[in-house]
Image: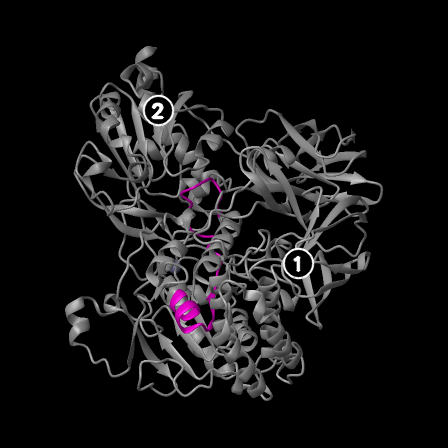
Amino acid sequence: MRKSYVILAFLFVFAFAKIYAQGITVQPVKPTASEIYQDLQKLNFLGSVLYVAAHPDDENTTAISYFANTVKARTAYLSLTRGDGGQNIIGPELRELLGVIRTNELLAARATDGGEQRFTRANDFGYSKHPDETLAIWNKEEVLGDVVWAIRTFKPDVIINRFNHRTPGSTHGHHTSSAMLSVEAFDLAGDTSKYKEQLEYTDTWKPSRQFFNTSWWFYGSKEKFDEADKSKLVQVDVGTYYPSLGLSNTEISSLSRSQHKSQGFGNTGSRGSEDTYFELLRGEMPTNNDVFQGINTTWTRVKGGKAIKTILDQVVTDYDFTAPEKSIPQLAKAYALVQQLDDAHWKAIKSKELQDIITACAGIYLEAAANTGYATLGSEVTLKLEAINRSMQSVMLNSAVVTSSNQQLASDTPLANNNSLSIEATVTIDDSFKDTSAYWLREEGTLGMYRVDDPTMIGKPETPQQNKVKFDLTIAGVPISIEKPIVFKYNDRVKGEVYEPFEIVPAVSSKLDSKVIIFAKAESKKIPVTVTAHQDNFSGSVSLTAPSGWTITPKSVNISIALKGAEQKVIFSVTPPSTDSEGDLTPVVTAGNKTYTKELVTIDYAHIPLQSLFLPNKAKIVRLDIERKGDYIGYIQGAGDAVPDNLTQIGYQVAIIEPSTITPELLAQFDAVVVGIRAYNVVDEMQAKQPLLLDYVKSGGTLIAQYNTSGRWGDTKIGAPYEMQLSRDRVTDENSEVRILAENHPIMNFPNKLTQKDFEGWTQERGLYFPNKWDDAYTPILSMNDKGETAKDGSLLVAPYGDGHYIYTGLSFFRELPAGVSGAYKLFANMLSIGKQEKSEIKQ
Ligand SMILES: [Zn+2]
């Protein structure tokens, strides 16, 4: 675990040094005098905007940045899902791991544009053509409740929907659903009879206005938009220039959008005036293009706020960019008044903002750094506290306490100007320390919903950092408490100072090499289990559980690991039953009366903090009667998929082909060559090498190309041997009927006889971007369609070419094979075996 931490340690690269309070909590915040001034202006605005859409990357970052930085409103993006169903162009993670990446990309985006981030429990289960389907797979009542919860807790004055709730079927079903639920929740949030259980933790809320963030695109063309009635449209110029940041709003928006790296959303900034439109759905139409018109957004909004307003208006007027500390006495006075407010909502928000501003003005820096990135319950860590005041203000550190265990680390120490206080203490990680793992992945959910047992966690972007040190200070006579999460900090010889989260982890984790293990024969396989200790001197035993009919030997193996971070590998022999069977294989580590069944998955990319996830560890084991011809397969990776690993599972030897190394001699070695998903979209060299691949087919080879998206390169660049046109045809219902068009074609018969039964148990979808026009040289093999649509026959096209075969398929093998879908394995084996029947007969 640690090895990868050290080698691949993350690095934050942000557009500006300021990291906003919410979101990425690992890297310390060090605001400049200009940023403090921005924050002071924001302190004096008491209004909120909630932006609603379905996925990470749906949000209009220009609008979010505009409301956060120009209007200075509290601005949040409610993304109904975490984007698990998307594709990943930066790495192999899919499903919930992709959801973790995209959650953090949203947090990085918000850290850039100044917004906050919220979610619901809805799971992005994949593409959906209609909200009816979406809302049948999501638990509609629960997701609606989560939107109501977001409104009741965030308390927006204005809600803005990204999508149109009146046009179901015109875009992704999740998109329309997000708008429909937002419209419905607008009324329910204020109704005490709805979602009553929430009122134990919050109160009702009535937003004032709701808009749809429209644009000419929703009207079909710019001309149509020019002619449209705009009496219900608020028009806003979002091209503000911020001299204090040296950036235009539209530049910040691009920096924010570019955080969606897994989706390839790198974006180049623009400068200058730019209009955005908001169509009024609810509330009174503003007459001045101000979405807050008529809503009091000053301190007088709250009872007792007038005196605070007087003080803070003066602070803004008197602010000295060369000496922000001069503002402290007045800020301290305002802070004391805020503590007397009855309005708990604004009191909490403004107290936190004031604390941050006061400490920033005083150049106060507080840190609690552990000597390790992770610890198990019962262990000890060394904690190093740093506290410094870099101002002439009198600052007293009254106490520093570990919040969970109440261990006192410091007391009654004055912090003199620019004298760093450093304290080292040993801290026992007792049972009071909180689990730091992703809360929405702790329990297994359903296809459409995450399971979250703690209602107060719902909506939070990530598990809050609950292992903290609380610093009680007195600044300019006012008591102020500041909590700092415990972090892991170390020096990297190349990167310098590196911060990582401090995680509470189980004593041990285990790992299987594969998530799906296919037994193509009745023979047993050696299955290694790697056990990693996360503490010193771990001893226990490991065993494997399997469905009945499967035999595991030995029953259990003793393990003993001396050093934290070290591993021990244990080999089990797993023998399948003689007939088809499938189920889960789960390693169980036992120590005393405790059992451990989780595996550690780390996700490490430069643009997000290091993620250490402990997830249920299991592999799907499948006993499958499968035949294959040919042995040696060449695989050209595209956007990244696990198909090569899956093919080795059924006995193929797979070589990854680097496109630049493609030569006729290289290709001649292979029994078939497979092109990974979207290779023609993302690997530039494919175009140049395609003639060599076709020559290989001509002289008897088999080339299988998996799905590419239509549009980006046009259709000819796939370089198919005969004309073929990619379309956006897709079949998203994984249970849709599959009709076999070419029953006698070898691909349906050799070496495995395929029937409709082999299309049962597929996952997420059938396939995508099917060709919708093709030359007669191709044989369409299968026909399928989603409910209410015309038949789509282009999912699997096969054509002889020279002495070989060319196959193009939009079927989602990249999802089905990793999921252990047996019919998909048989079909892929038949694709790889095509033409091999005749050859073996000729040889004999
Ligand atoms: Zn979307």
User: Regarding ligand 1, which quadrant of the image does it lie in?
Assistant: bottom left
Tell me what residue is drawn at x 52 percent, y 86 percent: 301
Closer mark to the observer between disc 2 and disc 1: 1
Dot 1 amino acid type: Asn
* Along the viewing direction, whichever of 124 and 29 lies nearer the viewer: 29
Displayed quadrant of residue 281: bottom left
Q: Is residue 22 above or below residue 564?
A: below
- How packed mark 1 is, by other alpha carbons closer than 10 Å (few <14, some 14-19, many 20 or more), is many
Whether residue 141 is visible to the viewer of this picture, yes or no, is yes
Give the residue pinned by disc 2: 672
Q: Position of residue 636 (x, y in %)?
A: 36, 29
Query: Which secondary structure lies at badge 2?
Result: strand
Q: Is residue 406 left or right of residue 281?
A: right
Chosen colour scheme: one colour
Question: Considering the image in quadrants, where does the C terminus appear?
Answer: top left
Tell me what residue is drawn at x 47 percent, y 47 percent: 13
Magenta stretch: give its range.
65-94
Does the stretch in magenta take in 85?
A: yes
Q: Position of residue 604 (x, y in %)?
A: 53, 41
Q: Is residue 482 left or right of residue 760?
A: right
Indicate which disc, 2 or 1, sits on the residue closer to the N terminus. 1
Query: Which secondary structure lies at badge 1?
Result: loop
Q: Position of residue 28 (x, y in %)?
A: 59, 53
Dot 2 amino acid type: Ala
Q: Is residue 295 left or right of residue 22?
A: left
Displayed quadrant of residue 483: bottom right
Give the residue pinned by disc 1: 389
